[in-house]
Each structure stands twice: as C-alpha cells, then as structure tokens.
Amino acid sequence: MPSKNKLPDLSVIIPAYNEEQRIEGAVDSLFTALEGAGIDLEAIAVYDTSSDGTEKALERLAARHHAFSYFHNAYEPGVGTAIATGLDRYRGRTAAIYVADAADDPEDLVCLYRKFEEGFDCVFGSRFIEGGSIEDYPQFKLMMNRIINLFLRLAFGLRTNDVTNGFKLYGRHVIDGIKPIKSKGFDIALELPLKAAIRGYSYVVIPTRWHGQPGKRSNMRSMRVAWEYFARILECMHYRLTCLMACP
C-alpha cells in the first residue's frame, strides 16, 4: 500500500454502475496483478446511482483493500462524469481507466505501466494489433467500432487503430493538460486520447485483450453511443483548430 505522503505509481479509476455481481472479482484481480508486479497502486471506484447492491460491494472492497476507496459521482449520472470525478480525486503519478466488469485483463495494465516507465506520456491499448484480442464482441458493435476508428485515424492522423478503447494510461501532467473533461457518457473514451494527441503528448500503442460478457446487446444502445462519439469528434476537431490557432 502506498504511503499517504508518497504518490502512488498508478491510480486506477473504475466507474461503477450496476456491477454488484462483477466488481469485487475485477478489483481483487487488479490488486493481485499489480501488487504482484510491485506497482504501488490506488484504486478509486466512482459509484453512479446504481439500482442494485453495487455500493455494498464497494464497502466490502474498501474493508478488504487499504488502497481502495470509492466516491459518489460528483456530477450528473454517466460513465464520463464518473470518470471525471475519479480524475478530480486521484493521487497517482499516472492514471488509467478500468472497467468494473473485468473485460480488460489486469496483467495488461501492468504492461501499460511498464511501457510508460520507458518515457512516454501516454500508453494506448489496442485490441486490433498483433498480440491483442477480443472475445464475445457483438458483431454490430464491432462493425461500428472499425468504421469510427478508421475515420479517426484519417481525420486526426493517429497511429492507433483503437481510439475508442478506453483502456489507456496517462501521466498526471497529461490529465492536467487536457482538463476540463467535458464528456458525460462513453465518449470520454475519445476525449482523453484525442486531446492528448492534439496537444502533442507522446504516446505508444501496445496490444491488450478484451473479454466480453456473453449475451445479446442492444444495437440501439450502440447507435446512441455512436452519436455521442460523433458529437465528441466534432468538438475535438474544434479543439484541434483552436490549439493550432493558438500556436505561435
């Protein structure tokens, strides 16, 4: 456990909405992997007005792990605002977003941090390069993912093909440099890396693995997220123009 007077190596922000059945296993696995790798860790869950027993699960985790804490979303409900709440409160030298349903592999988070130690400002995970993988990914969502990511690569000149993957790690100076965070929903997965790239922070892409939850997903929900992405892309284009005009 990191000392209160020492910055943790890594802060992991975990939005928590209706994750009673999965979040304890996800967080326990996270601590096992990172503490086993000798990484000083703090994990911050942000409770987002769940209708199940998620908060009770968070209380059990706080009793079990001294480096775990949780807060209520300080803004209106939404995954983006929950993450923004965590990014207001974290203490670490670096910050990463981690999903409460254990879709991302905690061993990959160790790899993200080790790559950061080589001197990069950010480390982006990609499920679509050699060594990366996806399991139980809905076909409609996959099609939308590939279309949006192709457009992003062309529009912003990016070197990653998985911008919409929220599994990324940022140095504290990067988070400070791209605030304020404006996203309310899943479009935060775009806002953070696009702003970081636009502002010229260095990044590297490494393979990561994603394990979905079997079962039918709603195509309508995927379409709503796509529209959130579209609005965020337009705003980031404006942000990029503003940054270019501000350059001497």
Image: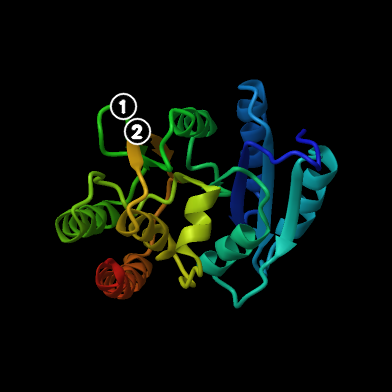
**How far is the residue under mark 2 from the one under mark 1?**
8 Å
Asked if one can make out residue 138 in the rendered structure from this viewpoint, the answer is yes
Q: Quadrant of residue 156?
A: bottom left
Q: Is residue 140 left or right of residue 185?
A: left
Q: Tell me what residue is drawn at x 63 percent, y 64 percent.
A: 85
In the displayed orientation, state which residue is furthest to the right: 63
Q: Nearer the viewer, residue 33 or 168?
A: 168
Q: Tell me what residue is drawn at x 65 percent, y 21 percent.
A: 36
Q: Nearer the viewer, residue 25 or 213?
A: 25
SS label for mark 2: strand
Q: Is residue 211 above or below residue 18?
A: above
Residue 205 screen position, x and y as percent: 32, 37
> Which residue in the structure is indicated by mark 2?
206
Q: Quadrant of residue 219?
A: bottom left
SS label for mark 1: loop
Q: Tell me what residue is drawn at x 62 percent, y 54 percent.
A: 19
Task: Report the amino acid beneath label 2.
Answer: Ile
Mark 2 crowdedness (10 Å alpha carbons): few <14, some 14-19, many ≥20: many
Q: Is residue 92 left or right of residue 199?
A: right
| Image marks 2 and 1: residues in contact by CB distance under 8 Å | yes
Mark 1 crowdedness (10 Å alpha carbons): few <14, some 14-19, many ≥20: few
Foreground disc of the pair 2, 1 = 2
Residue 43 screen position, x and y as percent: 67, 45
Q: Nearer the viewer, residue 101 or 45?
A: 45
Residue 184 screen position, x and y as percent: 49, 72
Task: Report the amino acid beneath label 1.
Answer: Gly
Q: Is residue 195 above or below residue 120?
A: below
In the displayed orientation, state which residue is furthest to the front: 248
> Which residue in the structure is indicated by mark 1?
131
Q: Which quarter shows the N terminus?
A: top right
Q: Is residue 176 above or below residue 77?
A: above
